[in-house]
Image (cartoon, helix red, strand yellow):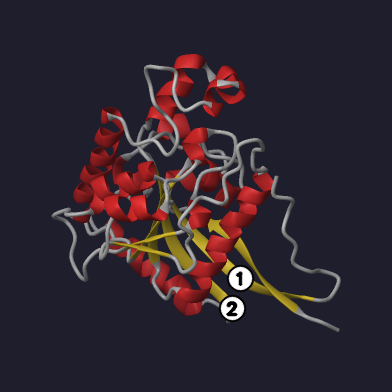
Amino acid sequence: MPVYTKREYSIVTGFFAQDDPDADAVAIGALPPRFGLLDDSADRWDRFKARIKELNAAAAPGTQYKVYFFARHGQGFHNVGEAKYGTKAWDEYWSKLDSDGELVWGPDPELTSVGLGQARAAREAWRTERASGIPLPERHYASPLQRALRTFQETFVGADFLDGPPIRCTILENLREESGEHTCDKRSPRGVIAQKFPPPIYDFEEGFSEEDTFWKPDVRETKAHVTERAVQVFDRIFSLDKETYLCISAHSGIINGFLRAMGRPGYPLVTGGVLPLVIKAVDVQLTQSWAPSVPELW
């Protein structure tokens, strides 16, 4: 009888205000003190790191714990466009255009001045908590869309709180926003991205294409497929990365895909916000009654 191995993911609660399933995102805000860590003691981050180390040391075979900092990009010109026209008109009409003659939001818009300020506010939040011993991300991953890459850059690149090896960021196609129809979600060609975000800081995953073959002009990606993309990123990281602390610079759609993959309701993370979570991964063996499947894309 064939046996399949899959990984199940869940959120470990009790560490951050945001990990409560009933958390009020509006009350918590984009960048709460201590990034939402409930422990407010002077040695809070040392205690946190010790607890994560204990969890991994005591974990059964096939079980891992990692800490993810999900960072949503700062405000982009598409966010201004949606606010200007309202979500209904945006989804039905304006999002399918590149511009309204005043604002340009497609394809692949950059951050506004407000968005740049939000990314720099995240940098200050990291600097503040670094003084109290927050563990820095050991690996960074980002969406290929410019607004996410620019947010990573403004938050981390050249920051005076960094130590250790030079900072690197791997660009993953699967970390892009919910795709299709909206021109803001069509990415730039690989060559353009590489010119704006060059090595050695930035590198592309293997097989990253020159042109955006994923985005479709006439069909919106399903949320089921966004969730499947999130699972594929989880699988990659938990299979290949030995590091415990990671940062993902991306978008609300894919961040909520990660949450759905863990059976959690959506979290309305605002632009420039950071959502920290302790995530547990467990290898589960299943018989032939289960087989992996990929949901309908579009």
Q: Horizontal and vertical percent for residue 214? A: 57, 50
Give the image quarter of residue 285. Answer: bottom right
Q: Residue at x 19, y 50 (%)?
A: 127
Left or right: 269 as drawn, with respect to 159: right
Above or below, 119 against 44 in this view is above
Q: Which image quarter holds the N terminus?
A: bottom right
Give the image quarter of residue 281. Answer: bottom right
Left or right: 265 as drawn, with respect to 210: right
Above or below, 253 against 141 in this view is above
Q: Horizontal and vertical percent for residue 53? A: 39, 72
In this figure, which residue is indicated by the disc labeled 1? 282
Q: Residue at x 60, y 37 (%)?
A: 217
Q: Are marks 1 and 2 in contact (CB under 8 Å)?
A: yes
Which of the two residues, 177 or 160, is positioned nearer the viewer here? 177
**Callout 1: helix, strand or loop?**
strand
The furthest residue to the bottom: 1
| Nearest to N terminus: mark 1 or mark 2 | 2
Residue 232 visible in image:
yes
Q: Which image quarter holds the C terminus?
A: top right
Left or right: 4 as drawn, with respect to 44: right
Q: CA distance from mark 1 to mark 2?
A: 6 Å
Residue 69 visible in image:
no
Left or right: 197 as drawn, with respect to 77: left
Q: Horizontal and vertical percent for residue 172? A: 46, 59
Q: Residue at x 27, y 58 (%)?
A: 198
**Callout 2: helix, strand or loop?**
loop
Which of the two residues, 99 or 171, is positioned nearer the viewer here? 99
Q: Residue at x 49, y 67 (%)?
A: 207
Q: Horizontal and vertical percent for residue 171? A: 41, 58
Give the image quarter of residue 201. Answer: bottom left
Which amino acid type is shown beneath numbered disc 1? Val
In this figure, which residue is indicated by the disc labeled 2? 62
